[in-house]
Image: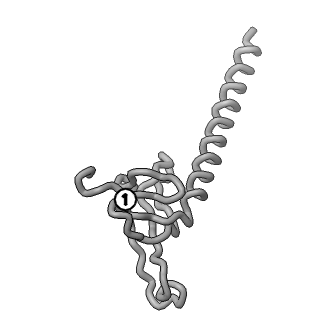
Amino acid sequence: MENCIGIDYILIGLYTNYIILIYKVMFMRIVKDLIGKEVLDSDVNNMGIVDDIEFDKESNEILSLVLKRKGISNTLRASKSEDIVPFDLVKTIGDKIILKDTYDI
C-alpha cells in the first residue's frame, strides 16, 4: 500500500510540472502574438508597434510594452527611441492594442 502512495505523489508531481509547462507555453504564445501589434491611444493616434515585452519571470505577469515608432526614421534607424507603456494602461487587445483614456486611469 505504501508503494501506491509514493506513485500518487510522483503522478501529482508530473501533473503539476505538465500544467506549469502548458502555462509557460501559453504565456509565450500570448507574448509572441502581442509583438508586432499596432498600439493606439484612446484618441486613435498611432503610438507605435510592440517591439518587446517586459515581464516578471517569476509570476509571468506582463509589466510593460516596449514600442517602436513607425516611419522613415525607424526604417533608416536614425533614432533609437523607444516608448515604454505600462501594461496597466492597456484597455483592449484585438487586432490592435488600444490604451486607456486618462479618465480610465
Above or below, 60 relative to 102: above
Residue found at x 54% / y 57%? 95
Type of residue at label 1?
Pro
Neighbourhood count class around disc 1 (C-alpha, 10 Å): few under 14, some 14–19, many 20 upward: some
Q: Which residue is mark 1?
A: 86
Residue closest to the eye, 11 or 63: 63
Residue at the farthest top position: 1
Determine whether the residue tagged by mark 1 lies in a helix, strand or loop: strand
Relative image position of residue 43 (x, y in whole percent): 33, 63
Quadrant assignment for the N terminus: top right
Quick check: 23 left or right of 10? left
**Residue 7 placement: quadrant:** top right
Residue found at x 62% / y 52%? 29
Q: Disc count in the image?
A: 1
Above or below, 81 relative to 57: below
Residue found at x 59% / y 57%? 33
**Residue 66 placement: quadrant:** bottom left
